[in-house]
Structures are given as C-alpha cells and as structure tokens.
Image: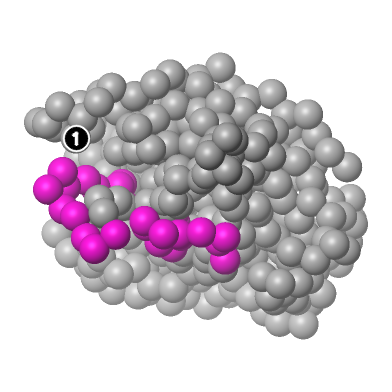
Amino acid sequence: MTAQNTPTPATFTGDASPYGGGEPYADYRTADFPFTQYANLADRQLGAGVIAANDEFFAMRENLLLPHAAVFDPEHFGHKGKVMDGWETRRRRGVSGEHPWPTEDDHDWALVRLGAPGVVRGIVVDTAHFRGNYPQAVSVEGTSVDGSPTPEELCGDDVKWTTLVPRTPVGGHAANGFAVDVEQRFTHLRVNQHPDGGIARLRVYGEVVADPAWLAALGTFDVVALENGGQVEDASDRFYSPATNTIQPGRSRKMDDGWETRRRRDDGHDWIRYQLVQQSEIRAVEIDTAYLKGNSAGWAALSIRDGESGEWVEALPRTRLQPDTNHRFVLDTPAVGTHARIDIFPDGGISRLRLFGSLTEQGAAGLAARHRELGG
C-alpha cells in the first residue's frame, strides 16, 4: 500500500539566507503544525534509535533524535570540516568529468527504529543551521517488522516499505512539516535525502499502538503509559512543560521532565485528561512529584470515565501531595474506564502519573481488533 501524501502548505520554505553572524536562529523558519499534539514516536526516551545510515561523513546519524534544539558554533571545525549538529553526508558526485552531477535517483538514507510502534500522524524534518548544505528534497517510508531486525534484514528485498512522505522539496534552516494520512502501524522508518546534505533533527508524531500479546502476558501494567498506548487528550496549561511528560517511561530526571503550569492568580485549578490504552480496570495509582520542590501541586484528585459520554467518577479523592515525592495509593474499589483525569490544586506540577491495572475483556478485544486493522 502506497499513500500519495500531500505535504502541509508550510513544507517548502525556500532557500536559507547565508549565515551572517549574530543570533544563529534569527532567520529560522517554522510553522504551527497541528500534528505536534501527538507524542514523538522517535523519542530516545521511548527507545528510538537511528540504527544505520549509508553515509555520515560530516555529522553522525544519532544527532537526528537528540531531544534539544540543534546548536551552531560558526568557529567550530574538525578534521573533516565544519562540525554540524545533525546528520550530514558528503557531497555526491557523478561517474566522470563529463557527467559530474549525481543522477536523479542518487540519495542518502538513514534507518530509524521507532521507540514505540504506532500510527504516524505527522513528521518534521528540521534543517536548522543547514543553509547551503541541506538536501534538495526528502522522502520518508515506513515498514512494520516484528522483533528486533538488523539493518541488513530491513534492507532486504522481502521488506515492504510504504510511502509516508513522497519526494518533496525542503527549505534550509527551517522546520519542514508533513502531515501523514496512512492508517497503518509502523515500527521503522527510512528517511531519504535527495541527493545528499544534512538534516538537524527528525520528529515523528503519532499514536502508539501496543502489541496485545505483550500486554496480555504482562497482566498488570501501566494502562496510561505512553509506551503502552495511553495518550494525553488535553490539559489546562502547558506553560513550562508538556503534559505528555507525565506518561513518559521511567522517573523524571530533572524539573522540566515533568509537567508544570504557570502560577494561578484566580480560584481555579489545573488538570490533564488522558485516554487509556483501552477499557481497563485500575487498582493502584502513583503520582510522582520528583524534582518539583517549590512548585509541586499542593493536592491532587483522580477521576475515571468509561466511554466518551460517560460520567466522571472519583477514584482518588483530593489528597495532599509532598514535594519531590512518589505517592502510592491502592484503590479500595477498582475503577473501570477508558479515560482518566488528574486535577491538581491549585497549580504547580507533577512529574509522572502511573495507573496500574489490566485490560477488561472488552478492552482486550478492542485493542486486538485495532492491532489487526492496522496491519499488526
């Protein structure tokens, strides 16, 4: 199946201006892409990696997935030339002096293992600081392969690749965004740059679709975790850090690795609403305020809803929280539902939310059906 995907209007932003010194990001171009509401499936924290590339002469392929914005030092040169914060290949050449130009089909590629398999909703190919050395065009393909395939296996003739982003011109020193409309579950991507050049960062936004057999074998697991298919639907405030941080793997490592809101000056409160992996029975709750010391939430309450039109039912009443502390609660009565909402009072933040339980019979059937529909 090959999808003819139409890039978002902001995809090609034109040639970059030559670097003139001063602020490196002064003429950086970007746009608001609607798909960035989804989780980044190519997040290193989820386990993503760039497992192979045909060429990385000037700059390493691993830079593509670094979480921070690309940096640029105009005076930094190494033994191979200018040091760039991204993935950069050497200049391609033709076969002879009479034909010194690369052919139409010449291109460089990198293989990316997604941190969590899922449906891709949008891709950002960021060429920050690549002004005269960015690719003329890019394309992205996806595949779904069980287990942990080697790069050689992924390059085999028996692997079927689906086009997510057709060959499309890109701009230099810009965030080039592409909406994707392919209802299929992918485990790996192949990023192509035509014919050569450099890309600073790659972001792959989408919805995690977990393996039903794996979750069934676990029995009890975190039913709101991003890696298991949970997702943030909405939040009252994302001023300092994204709400999605609360369902990332592992414990928070620093203050901005959680969720923190601005200071309220009214009588309201802040909240996050989640969609669980499927209908689940929740038996235990963890609310962690790690690294939030003078700015943790004062109190928190948890509610569960079953179905889009269900009523919110309180599962954990308003409870005092301590700074920089992992709070654990065993529910007196298991809560069954498809959605969860944590309310914090009055503001501040939490670093992680864990909802431990298992899929109901209805939830397990729903996940298995979706997994089949998406080619899993």
Magenta residues, start to end: 52-80
Q: In the rendered image of this protein, does residue 237 appear above or below residue 353?
A: above
Q: Which residue is mark 1?
A: 24
When asked about the image quadrant of residue 266, the answer is top left
- The structure residue drawn at horizontal position 52% and vertical position 44%, both measured from the top left corner, is 93
Residue 214 appears left or right of 139: right
Residue type of the residue flagged with mark 1: Pro
In this rendered view, identify the residue nearer to me: 146 or 372.
146
**Is residue 175 among the parts visible in the rendering?**
yes
When asked about the image quadrant of residue 146, the answer is bottom right
In this rendered view, identify the residue nearer to me: 43 or 271.
43
What secondary structure do most residues of the magenta stretch adopt?
Answer: loop
Q: Position of residue 114 (x, y in %)?
A: 61, 60
In this rendered view, identify the residue nearer to me: 176 or 179.
176
* Residue 72 belongs to the span the image colors magenta: yes
Residue 319 appears left or right of 340: left
Residue 335 appears left or right of 34: right
Q: Position of residue 262 (x, y in %)?
A: 23, 40
When asked about the image quadrant of residue 159, the answer is bottom right
Label tally: 1
- The structure residue drawn at horizontal position 72% and vertical position 50%, both measured from the top left corner, is 142
Q: In the rendered image of this protein, does residue 296 appear above or below residue 307?
A: below
- The structure residue drawn at horizontal position 50% and vertical position 22%, both measured from the top left corner, is 12
- Local crowd at mark 1 within 10 Å, few (<14), some, or many (≥20)? some
